[in-house]
C-alpha cells in the first residue's frame, strides 16, 4: 500500500483532498478515470465514513471533495486511477478527525 500524508480535519470542515500521481506516471501517460473510497481505520462511525465527492482529474492529480466524519475517528481514504497505459494505480492515506483548537 502506498500511504500518503493527509492533514487532519475538523468534523464540520469540508475540503478538497488532492491525490498526486505524478511520480507513478510514465512520460506522456495520463489519468483516464478515477474513483475514491473511504473506510473506518480506527474508532466508531455508525454512518460509515466521511462524504466523498466525484473525483476531478487535472493532469496527474485527482481532487476529491471530502466532508463530514466523526470526531476521534481515523479513516483510510483511497484514490484509484486508471491510466492511458491501462495501469491501475492506488494511493491511500489516513485521515484523522480532530477537535477544534480552543
Image (cartoon, rainbow, N blue to C red):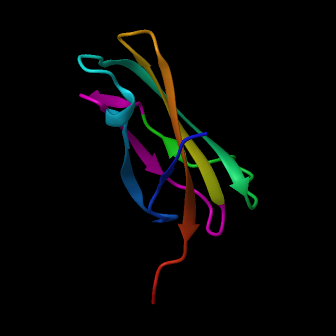
Q: With respect to residue 79, does 72 lie above or below?
A: below
Q: Quadrant of the N terminus?
A: top right
Where is residue 84? Give x, y as percent.
Answer: 35, 11
Q: With respect to residue 13, does 54 lie above or below?
A: above
Q: Quadrant of the C terminus?
A: bottom left
Task: Specify the quadrant of the image occupied by residue 82.
Answer: top left
* Magenta part of the chain: 54-73
Q: In the rendered structure, does residue 68 fall within the stretch colored magenta?
A: yes
Q: Residue at x 45, y 48 (%)?
A: 66
Q: Residue at x 30, y 28 (%)?
A: 57
**Residue 39 appears left or right of 69:** right
Which residue, as the protein is rendered here, is positioned at the far front?
A: 27
**Residue 59 appears left or right of 54:** left
**Residue 89 appears left or right of 56:** right
Where is residue 93? Give x, y as percent.
Answer: 54, 49
Please name whichever residue, 86 or 99, is drawn nearer the observer in this view of the structure.
Answer: 86
Task: Specify the quadrant of the image occupied by residue 53.
Answer: top left
Q: Residue at x 23, y 16 (%)?
A: 28
Q: With respect to residue 29, does 57 lie above or below?
A: below
Where is residue 95? Give x, y as percent.
Answer: 55, 57
Where is residue 9? Give x, y as percent.
Answer: 47, 64
Q: With respect to residue 81, does 44 lie above or below?
A: below
**Image mark count:** 0
Q: Residue at x 52, y 31 (%)?
A: 90
Q: In the rendered structure, does residue 74 fall within the stretch colored magenta?
A: no
Please name whichever residue, 70 or 26, is drawn nearer the observer in this view of the structure.
Answer: 26
Amino acid at each position: 500500500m502506498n500511504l500518503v500524508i493527509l492533514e487532519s480535519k475538523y468534523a464540520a470542515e469540508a475540503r478538497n483532498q488532492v491525490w498526486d500521481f505524478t511520480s507513478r506516471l510514465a512520460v506522456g501517460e495520463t489519468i483516464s478515470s478515477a474513483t475514491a473510497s473511504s473506510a473506518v481505520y480506527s474508532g466508531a462511525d455508525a454512518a460509515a465514513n466521511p462524504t466523498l465527492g466525484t473525483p476531478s482529474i487535472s493532469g496527474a492529480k485527482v481532487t476529491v471533495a471530502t466532508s463530514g466524519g466523526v470526531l476521534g475517528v481515523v479513516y483510510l481514504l483511497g484514490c484509484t486511477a486508471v491510466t492511458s497505459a491501462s495501469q491501475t494505480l492506488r494511493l491511500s492515506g489516513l485521515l484523522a478527525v480532530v477537535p477544534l483548537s480552543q
